[in-house]
Image: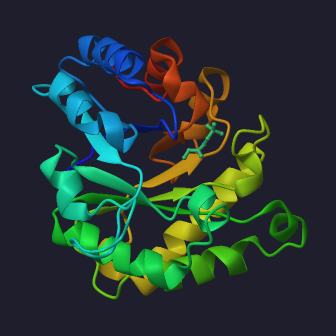
Amino acid sequence: MSLPRPIVFGNWKMHGLRRDALALAGSLAERYVRPSGSLGIFPPFTVLAEVARRVAGTRMIVGGQDCHDRPEGPFTGCVSAPMLADAGARAVILGHSERRHGLGERDEWICRKVQAAWGSGLLVVLCIGETEAEWLAGRRFEVLDRQLAGSLPEEVPAGRLVIAYEPVWAIGTGRTPTLEDIRDTHAWLRQRLRARRPAVGDLPLLYGGSVKPENAGDIMAQPDVDGVLVGGASLDPEQFWRIYLAGGGS
Ligand code: 13P
């Protein structure tokens, strides 16, 4: 999938009853005409199909927030990659810290989910990031390296992967790393991917964690930051759109 910059993706998390979700999606669809960048929204499963229908005809990407690694079976409460695709999703977020830390998801399982998502033709937004304790202990690169190695399959198809660096301590806290730290981490990620995965080393890298209209322009101006993954501010169409504009989108 070709993803013109800036790439601005909104992770709605567990927010969005039908009426609000459709209003939000509709408000974005009305602005997103003849777009220069890539806008994507990741609503809850319950509204995904309706949201996908609401934005059909625009280039907006609609995705799920997780999927199981199996196509179907006795897995109460889970949703598979073919089900997401069937509902109109073109992408899926995997490995989000709220699932890694909140629900105990491990790299091996995430790796199998990534493979399953690709099997259904979905774009994977793979999230990685260190906790505050790991950050303070200076273990950021070690953790990112482990998560990259553990949650990425050997063969990565071209155009099917985006990596989102989301420091756990920056999510929903209003705190962000300094621009210099974001620059350093993304440069390190780029170099690491080029060395380890030369075929896809130039894949898009997003930053996530307390992105707001006020800081989005500076963050997206950093080298090797191709866009942002937005949580809270993606629930307000005005703020989300201002973030997209701040990254140079139109
Ligand atoms: P916030 O933008 O609310 O900090 O959330 C970031 C995030 O977790 C996106 O996946």
Please identify the quadrant where the C terminus is shown. top left
Between 243 and 105, which is closer to the camera in this rendering?
Answer: 105
Q: Residue at x 82, y 65 (%)?
A: 135
Residue occupying image coordinates x 29% and y 77%: 115
Q: Is residue 184 left or right of residue 62?
A: right
Dividing the image into four quarters, tell me where ligand 1 lies: top right
Q: Is residue 1 visible to us here? A: no
Q: Is residue 223 left or right of residue 69?
A: right
Residue 25 at what x, y percent from top left? 32, 21
| Left-right relation of 92 to 230 | left
Residue situated in front as seen by the camera: 173 or 190 = 173
Question: In the rendered view, how is the structure colored?
Answer: rainbow
| Image quadrant where residue 113 sits | bottom left
Residue 192's place in the image compared with 161, above or below, is below
Query: Residue, x 83% and y 60% (percent of image)?
Result: 132
Q: Is residue 157 visible?
A: yes
Viewer-proximal residue among 192 and 116: 116
* Rendering coords of residue 40 (x, y %): 34, 37
Residue 44, quarter of picture: top left
Quarter occupied by residue 168: bottom right
Vertical placement of residue 140 versus 5, above or below? below
Q: Position of residue 90 (x, y in %)?
A: 21, 49
